[in-house]
Image (tube, rainbow, N blue to C red):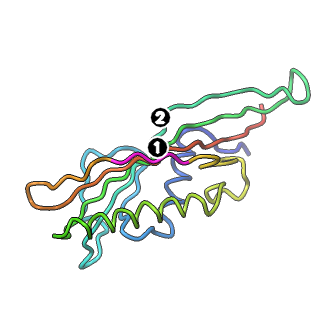
Amino acid sequence: MATLTGRAAVRAQLSSFIGNPPVPTLNQVWTSFPKNINFQVNAQAGQMSRAACVVFIQQETETRLAIGGSHSGWKRIDYTVILQIFQHSLHRDSTAAMDDFDTLIDAIKERLRSDHNFGDTSGTLVWQGAEPIIDAFYGEPNTNKEGATETFAELQFAVTQMIQA
């Protein structure tokens, strides 16, 4: 049976890994950008900050390693993955909104560090992820017309697959 590989498989594996068990205040994880983000979906009663995450593959590079000669070898596929994170906070105090955002980002990075195969016990779908670097980029918080604070972040890192070719 062939091993499932490729972009869709990486997005699905990473989405499942980040979303289960749930990261606190991260209510939704998608493998493609939704037409609309409804921050009420999966929100708990009284939850002041809610977040959504999109797993986006920005680019990939494929390299053949001819270990064993011209008719056998390995393909190394490196994906540049960006987790696009959107937080919507109902806190009246902007400091509380930012504290929730910092806690969310730290929890997602902790999850990424916890298993460099992102739950792939075979190690063939995700040979290595979020190594050696996780780059973080942050948007400036914005207060929308309803008074909610919205903040954006991107966590960028490499995911490597090794497949026999």
Looking at the picture, tell me which residue is in the foreground, 32 or 132. 132
Q: Please give left or right for residue 116 compared with residue 145 in the image.
A: right
Residue 46: x percent and y percent? Answer: 24, 79
Residue indicated by mark 2: 58
The structure residue drawn at horizontal position 9% and vertical position 60%, both measured from the top left corner, is 146
Q: Which residue is mark 1?
A: 82
Contact, mark 2 vs mark 1 (Cβ under 8 Å): yes
Asked if the stretch drawn in magenta spans residue 137, the answer is: yes
Check the image and report above or below for 46 versus 27. below
Q: Secondary structure at mark 2?
A: strand
Q: Is residue 39 above or below residue 35?
A: below
Question: Is residue 45 toward the left or the right of residue 158 in the image?
Answer: left
Tell me which segment is drawn in magenta. Answer: 134-138
**Of marks 2 and 1, which one's residue comes earlier in the chain?**
2
- Residue under the image location 84 percent in, 26 percent down: 66
Is disc 1 surrounded by few (<14), some (14 to 19) or many (20+) residues within 10 Å? many
Q: Residue at x 47, y 65 (%)?
A: 107
Relative side of 68 to 19, left or right = right
Q: Position of residue 103 (x, y in %)?
A: 40, 67
- Assign a secondary structure to mark 1: strand
Q: Position of residue 87 (x, y in %)?
A: 30, 58
Point out the residue furthest to the right here: 68
Quarter of the rendering occupied by the C terminus: top right
